Image: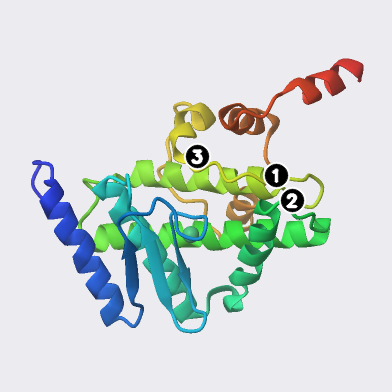
Amino acid sequence: MSKNKLSNADMEKMFYEIVQYSKDQGCPVTVFKSLEKINGSNGYFSADPEPHIKVALKNRPWPKAIELIIHEFCHYWQWQDGFLGRKDDEGNLIYSRILDGEHVSPTDREKASQLVRISEYDCEMRTEKLFEKWKLEEIFPPEEHKKSAATYNRHIVWSIGDKTTPGSGIFYAKYDTLGDKLWGNKKFTFFWDPTTSSGMAKIIEPISAEHKAVFDKAAGIKASKVAARKGRA
Ligand SMILES: [Zn+2]
């Protein structure tokens, strides 16, 4: 790919080529141009009753639309592989109950927190493989993508919580804008390797107080309760 930035028309064409590719691979895609969200998210893959993807494109720049469709296609790829014994959906179902404001048991919360994080991180690793395969690194620099995958991972644990700590129960859609606040100058040359115990420990690590504060502030959650509690301790 040349140094020249791709035009919007080029990227639109590429987006619809990926839509066609997904369809050819057995996973049809429905594109909603006039919706910002579809069933509460930017897009999703579901195998119920048959594999399909839905994506919402309103107000989404083409690079973000391309990233979204590739990400959702990678969930289909996971499904084809029988990734996590296809149990990742159990995690997503518990997560949607949490986002609906339902109280779930610490055991279910932990289950969702781990399944969703492991599944999404794996999906981001597959996404990067397709960026490489399709020569898209100029639009999606690998280090930026790894950082974004780490930010997404931290967003999930902030949102769902884990065994000992309830999450915010909020999906903060603009989480990706918080990368610099979370990580400063940290370089992301490698993915956390889920096949090693140290890599997996990173993926399912609890949220740190510092990271929690970044998300809370962005989502407009007041720190007063925490401060008050600290003040009394
Ligand atoms: Zn995903």
Q: Which residue is mark 1?
A: 206
Between discs 3 and 1, the one toward the N terminus: 3
Q: Which residue is mark 3?
A: 175
Side (left or right) of 186 relative to 60: right
Dot 1 surroundings within 10 Å: few (below 14), some, or many (20 or more)? some
Whether residue 110 is visible: yes
Determine whether label 2 and label 1 are within 8 Å by CB: yes
The percent position of residue 49, horizontal first and vertical second, equals 50, 84
Q: Say which label, 3 or 2, has the lower sequence index.
A: 2
Calculate the distance from the C-alpha at mark 2 to the C-alpha at mark 1: 7 Å
Question: Hey, which quadrant is residue 206 in on the image?
Answer: top right
* Residue density around tag 3, few if under 14, some if 14–19, many if 20 or more, within 10 Å: some
**Residue 51 badge:** none
Q: Residue at x 56, y 29 (%)?
A: 218
Where is 86 relative to 124, above or below? below
Q: In whole angstroms, how far apart are the C-alphas of marks 3 and 1? A: 17 Å
* Amino acid on which the number 2 mark rests in the picture: Asp
Give the left or right position of residue 194, taking residue 54 as reference: right
- Along the line of sight, which residue is nearer the eye, 143 or 43? 43
Q: Position of residue 47 (x, y in %)?
A: 49, 78
Label 3 to label 2, Cα distance in Å? 19 Å
Q: Amino acid at mark 1?
A: Pro
